[in-house]
Image (cartoon, rainbow, N blue to C red):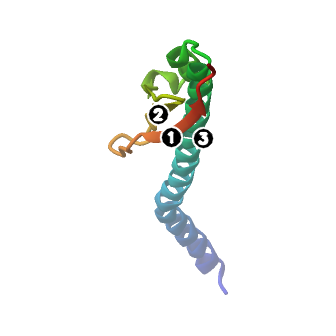
Amino acid sequence: MSRARKHRDRGQVAIEYIGFLPILLLVALAAVQLGLIAYTAQQAGTAARTGARSASLEGPYEADCRAAVSSWLADGTSCPASFGADEVTVTATVQIPSLVPGWDFDPAVKTATMPLDH
């Protein structure tokens, strides 16, 4: 193989790599976004359980629910409660942040029920 041909092949590999790089970055970004979705769902579950526990003890369940969520997710969090005769149910809704503008997701919603402490 001649020297000139080897040099041209190296340039071709670089061009192919540059063409593949955006696809690779998109796959990596999607993987990170999936991890963020799973983390947000876990945080919503923790917030619902904490809020239900606090509401069952007649505590400040809305504040406790928000405090159970990471501070950067707390702004998009709501925790309404519904009280029954013997139990309380808290539904935590946490907005899923998007890494890419235009990728919008439904919020993570988790519910927890605890018996009332009479």
Amino acid on which disc 3 is placed: Gln
**Residue 57 found in image quarter:** top right
User: Which residue lies under the disc numbered 1?
Assistant: 110
The answer to whether residue 5 is above or below residue 85 is: below
Please tell me which residue is depicted at 53% across the width and 60% down the height of the picture: 24
Against 118, is 33 above or below? Answer: below
User: In this figure, which residue is indicated by the disc labeled 3?
Assistant: 42
Q: CA distance from mark 1 to mark 3?
A: 9 Å
Mark toward the viewer: 2 or 3: 2
Mark 3 closeness class: few <14, some 14–19, many ≥20 residues within 10 Å: some
- Please report whichever mark, 2 or 3, sits nearer to the chain's N-terminal start: 3
Contact, mark 1 vs mark 2 (Cβ under 8 Å): yes
Q: Secondary structure under badge 1?
A: strand
> Where residue 61 sits: x, y (%)?
54, 18
Q: Amino acid at mark 1?
A: Lys
Between 92 and 10, the residue placed more toward the observer is: 92
Residue 29 shown left or right of residue 68 in the figure = left
Instruction: Give the residue number, with chain letter if any, for mark 2.
Output: 91
Secondary structure type for disc 2: strand
